[in-house]
Every structure is written in structure tokens, then in C-alpha cells.
Image (cartoon, rainbow, N blue to C red):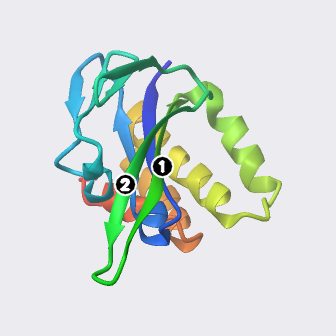
Amino acid sequence: MKYVIRIKAVSECMRIRRAALCYLKLENHTYDIHREIHPLKKFKSIQIIDSNIIVDGYREELKIGEEVYFYKTNIVDNGMEATSEELVLGAMIIPIDRSMEDNYLNIIEKNESIDEWKGEAFYLLGMMYEYDYKDDDRASLWYLKAKESGFNFGLFNMDNIS
């Protein structure tokens, strides 16, 4: 079974909630994404090693479909006052192999009321066709559907397709 890791940052700040979402292929390598995802830079160190995530020295094992969370208090100074906000990082392993295709199609067919979930299902199908089926044409179609549903990560992946 092939996997990706979804990493997201959530806080009261809408900019961070919308901007910080990342998918990484899990192939038993060490990833250091600290420099790549701007809103997550408030965490000093984020690494993926095998199926473990290490955030600022705290290690959690990642499991399929179970999200793990890390919390950090962040001080925000707008020039007039300093307030604190809770920054939350969540991470989860998501399968992208053929055995999950029907599950993702089922999410789409249910016409979920939250478009984000439908767009994410389109995106995961695109990744499945890109990485598991090795079918770039079908992957592009799924990525475009993700974009049309407001899930813009599909555009990033389309740059990688030949």
C-alpha cells in the first residue's frame, strides 16, 4: 500500500488555516519541511522519519486515518497590542493506492456539503493516478476537478506531471 502524509496547521488566524496544508510521499526517507511551508515556520523543527513525525523534539507515530496534533502558543503583535493564539499542527497518513479508489469516489458521490472534503478526494485520486497507476493524463483530470472544487493543491502537482 502506498501512502502520503497530510500535514496541516490550524489556528484562529484564517490565513494560516487556509495556507498551511501539505502532502508528502512516505517512502522511508527523512523529510525536513521547515523551510518549505511558511505558516509552519513557527514550529522550530518538523521532520518525518519513516512513519513518525517529530515536531520541536516531540515524536508521534503516524497511523492511517488517525490525526496526531502538536500545540504551540504563538504571540502575535499587530503594532498596537500583543495577543496569543494557539497554533495547532495536525498530521495523518493517508493511503493513495488502488484499494482506496472506491472510498474516495464514494466521498465524491455523496456530494459532501463541505466542498473541501470533495476537493481533497479529487486531489487524492489525482495522486493515486500519478504515483500508483502512473497515468499522468488521468491524474491531471483529477487535479483539475480538485481545483474546480476549491482545493488548489491540484495545481501544484500538475507542474510535476510531464
Q: Viewer-proximal residue, 121 or 133?
A: 121
Q: Amino acid at mark 2?
A: Asn
Q: Viewer-proximal residue, 115 or 129?
A: 115
Q: Which label number is shown at residue 126?
A: 1
Q: Viewer-proximal residue, 24 or 140?
A: 24
SS at badge 1: helix
SS at badge 2: strand
Which quadrant of the view contains residue 26? top left
- At a point 21% along the width and 43% down the height, the residue shown is 34
Label 1 vs 2, first from the N-terminus: 2
Residue 100 lies left or right of residue 30; in this view the side is: right
Q: Residue furthest left?
A: 35
Measured from the top left, where is residue 74 in percent x and y?
A: 37, 54
Q: Residue furthest bottom?
A: 80
Which quadrant of the view contains residue 109? bottom right
Q: Which residue is mark 2?
A: 74
Q: Viewer-proximal residue, 125 or 88?
A: 88
Residue 64 lies left or right of residue 112; in this view the side is: left
Residue 135 lies left or right of residue 63; in this view the side is: left
* Above/below status of 71 relative to 146: above
Measured Cα–Cα span from mark 1 to mark 2 = 35 Å
